[in-house]
Image (spheres, rainbow, N blue to C red):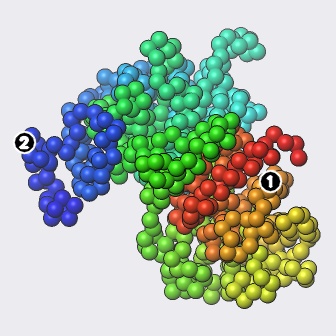
């Protein structure tokens, strides 16, 4: 009945206030042991109205005064009037003589579940508040900056860039000078190391005080939405490697500073996840509802809707179910031996148990999610109508090829380890989609095409889609591909092509648009026979991966278009193994489990069986044994 919508929500709320009513007992009144947490989540999946009940119950708190935030001089300093600090726990800056209300910044101290004032939650700075932001960072001796918004989101400025544009530039904000010491990019976030320093007024060359601070910038979390749980958990892990898993009492470092665009919804979600994980590390329990109440009493707007609150539950559940999945590369050989051993009680080895978890957590897309591929004029462009990309994660074709063409090709973006949308997975083109394939490569500025199969010559089912014998081939009405060179290696063929595009759109012709020639290299693996689950030479596949990365290093690291017969088998292995190898190189860690989860986000059919999953481990092991730290 709860889930059916036949009960009015007002009636449910009245019943919940009755302590003897069974419904009120579903709201946790104390921390929940992590061993019982999954059952708690299962109950909420069965009765989703419980999320709403908890969220609205927590929101019914006595509001505190916001007198300082509402002052006329301070109102213009607030991005969002719904996300402002209460007077009792606002961050008070040292006053600047002669400047009224210079002690105000839109920021609040917030407790964790273990430590008072563990966080400062603030809005993303606006033009007029950047100096106040850095004054606060310096004054409060902030341990790290956690930024959860893009600077631009759908053409709207969400937060001004409050740091220098590159590593060569030093910028001054009030009396604080800043330069970037180091930058590291990962698929969903960037880590920047800032040097903050003060100089003598009469001698700018003499530094009087300086400190280093890290900024963790999550770049794939759009406003009013939720990110991917495993990506946010990895982000939080990276933060805690710097800040420490638990902060000791005698730690001289100040609080973590957390901000999104307005210091509201996304900041509250991150605090909820971080504080509950910190509690579980110390006391093996979660207090999701209790901490939501604490947040609502600490600042207006933290965790802005029920979807975000549900996301907190889901992310903590994923943490409990998956556990620690990464390990140091030095343990790889021993770990793989242990994973192969069969568990006497479950009759499964660790590989099987991991893959089973991944399958249970793989998202399911509806026909509505994949509407583009199911449209009447696009259905014939799919080899399999059960394997169609979701509209939110597919590349859209932008080159005009005539009124009979659409923006659709059966392909999907896949994140790498260091870059989002690093791969585009697609199926071997059909006879009537050759123009669409080269439009995909051209429009997305792919630097490389990787073909993981070698169908029979003159195959009707798998038509040739690049020039083999002639120097030039035309594909569709606007694209011509010019052969520019080829090389043969053991089990690998390599071609270089120039792609030319003819402008046929009247609007573009009138505007004088010129289409530049693009260069792409195509790599074909010839040792993965049709029908085989893995290639006959692991060394050749790893060598091909290396060749592709060496070529991309000479270009602008455009996406890699990965082609298999059906756009599902083989491609996931290539993308996941590549991501794992990058993690080995960059951080000395192995995490095949999360790499496979990531590639299956947008296409659940990738890494479609246990053989492919285990082979990802084999590829990483082969790379570590034969390629890692080798000059060749």
Taking 146 as reference, is 440 left or right?
right
Taking 380 as reference, is 346 left or right?
left
Residue 443 spot, x, y in % from top left? 70, 69
Quadrant holding the N terminus: bottom left
Q: Is residue 223 visible?
A: no
250 relative to 435, above or below? above
Nearer to me, 63 or 46: 46
Label of residue 132 in the image: none
Residue 430 spot, x, y in % from top left? 68, 83
Nearer to me, 89 or 393: 393
Taking 323 as reference, is 556 left or right?
right
Does dot 2 land on a helix, a strand or a loop?
Answer: loop
Which residue is pictured at 77% across the width and 44% down the height? 625
Does dot 1 land on a helix, a strand or a loop?
Answer: helix
Nearer to me, 592 or 246: 592
| Residue highlighted by disc 2 | 20
User: Which picture quadrant has residue 212?
Assistant: top right
341 relative to 414, above or below? above
Nearer to me, 168 or 435: 435
Which residue is pictured at 11% across the width and 43% down the height? 17
Which residue is pictured at 44% across the width and 14% down the height? 249
Residue 544 spot, x, y in % from top left? 80, 59
210 relative to 1, above or below? above
| Crowding at mark 1 (Cα within 10 Å: few <14, some 14-19, many 20+) | some
Q: Mark 1 and mark 2: span between their CA atoms?
A: 65 Å
499 relative to 285, above or below? below
Label of residue 546 in the image: 1
| Crowding at mark 2 (Cα within 10 Å: few <14, some 14-19, many 20+) | few
Label located before the other in sequence (1 or 2):
2
């Amino acid at each position: 009945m709860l889930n059916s919508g036949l009960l009015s929500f007002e009636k449910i709320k009245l019943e919940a206030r009755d302590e003897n009513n069974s419904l009120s007992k579903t709201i946790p009144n104390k921390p929940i042991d992590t061993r019982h947490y999954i059952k708690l989540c299962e109950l909420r999946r069965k009765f989703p109205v419980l999320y709403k009940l908890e969220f609205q119950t927590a929101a019914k708190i006595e509001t505190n005064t916001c007198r300082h935030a509402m002052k006329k001089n301070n109102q213009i300093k607030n991005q969002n009037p719904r996300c402002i600090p209460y007077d009792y726990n606002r961050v008070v800056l040292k006053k600047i003589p002669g400047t009224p209300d210079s002690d105000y910044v839109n920021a609040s101290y917030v407790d964790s579940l273990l430590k008072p004032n563990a966080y400062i939650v603030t809005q993303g700075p606006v033009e007029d508040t950047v100096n106040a932001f850095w004054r606060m960072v310096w004054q409060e001796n902030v341990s790290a900056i956690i930024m959860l918004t893009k600077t631009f989101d759908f053409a709207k400025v969400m937060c001004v860039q409050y740091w220098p544009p590159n590593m060569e530039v030093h910028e001054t904000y009030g009396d604080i000078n800043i330069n970037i010491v180091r930058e590291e990019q990962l698929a969903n976030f960037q880590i920047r190391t800032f040097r903050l320093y003060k100089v003598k007024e009469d001698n700018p060359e003499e530094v009087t005080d300086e400190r280093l601070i890290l900024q963790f910038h999550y770049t794939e979390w759009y406003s009013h939405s939720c990110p991917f749980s495993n990506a946010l958990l990895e982000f939080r892990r990276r933060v805690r490697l710097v800040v420490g898993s638990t902060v000791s009492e005698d730690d001289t470092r100040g609080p973590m500073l957390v901000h999104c665009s307005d210091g509201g919804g996304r900041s509250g979600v991150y605090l909820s996840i971080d504080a509950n994980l910190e509690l579980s590390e110390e006391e093996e329990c979660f207090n999701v509802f209790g901490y939501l109440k604490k947040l609502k009493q600490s600042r207006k707007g933290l965790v802005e809707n029920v979807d975000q609150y549900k996301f907190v539950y889901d992310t903590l559940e994923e943490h409990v179910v998956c556990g620690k999945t990464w390990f140091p590369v030095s343990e790889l050989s021993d770990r793989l031996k242990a994973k192969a051993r069969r568990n006497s009680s479950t009759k499964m080895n660790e590989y099987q148990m991991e893959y089973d978890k991944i399958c249970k957590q793989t998202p399911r897309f509806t026909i509505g999610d994949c509407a583009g591929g199911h449209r009447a004029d696009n259905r014939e462009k799919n080899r399999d109508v059960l394997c169609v990309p979701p509209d939110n994660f597919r590349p859209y074709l932008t080159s005009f090829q005539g009124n009979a063409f659409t923006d659709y090709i059966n392909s999907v973006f896949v994140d790498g380890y260091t870059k989002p949308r690093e791969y585009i997975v697609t199926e071997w083109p059909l006879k009537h989609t050759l123009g669409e394939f080269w439009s995909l490569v051209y429009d997305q500025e792919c630097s490389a095409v990787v073909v993981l199969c070698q169908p029979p010559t003159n195959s009707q089912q798998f038509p040739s889609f690049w020039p083999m014998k002639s120097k030039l081939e035309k594909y569709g009405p606007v694209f011509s591909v010019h052969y520019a060179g080829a090389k043969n290696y053991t089990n690998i063929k390599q071609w270089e092509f120039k792609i030319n595009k003819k402008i046929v759109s009247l609007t573009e012709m009138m505007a004088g648009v010129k289409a530049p020639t693009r260069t792409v290299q195509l790599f074909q693996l010839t040792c993965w026979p049709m029908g085989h689950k893995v290639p006959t030479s692991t060394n050749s596949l790893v060598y091909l991966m290396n060749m592709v990365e060496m070529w991309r290093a000479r270009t602008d690291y455009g996406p890699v278009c990965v082609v298999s017969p059906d756009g599902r088998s083989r491609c996931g292995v290539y993308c996941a193994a590549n991501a794992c190898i990058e993690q080995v190189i960059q951080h000395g860690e192995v995490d095949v489990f999360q790499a496979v989860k990531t590639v299956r986000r947008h296409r659940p059919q990738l890494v479609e069986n246990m053989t492919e999953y285990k082979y990802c481990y084999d590829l990483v092991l082969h790379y570590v044994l034969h390629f890692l730290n080798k000059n060749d």
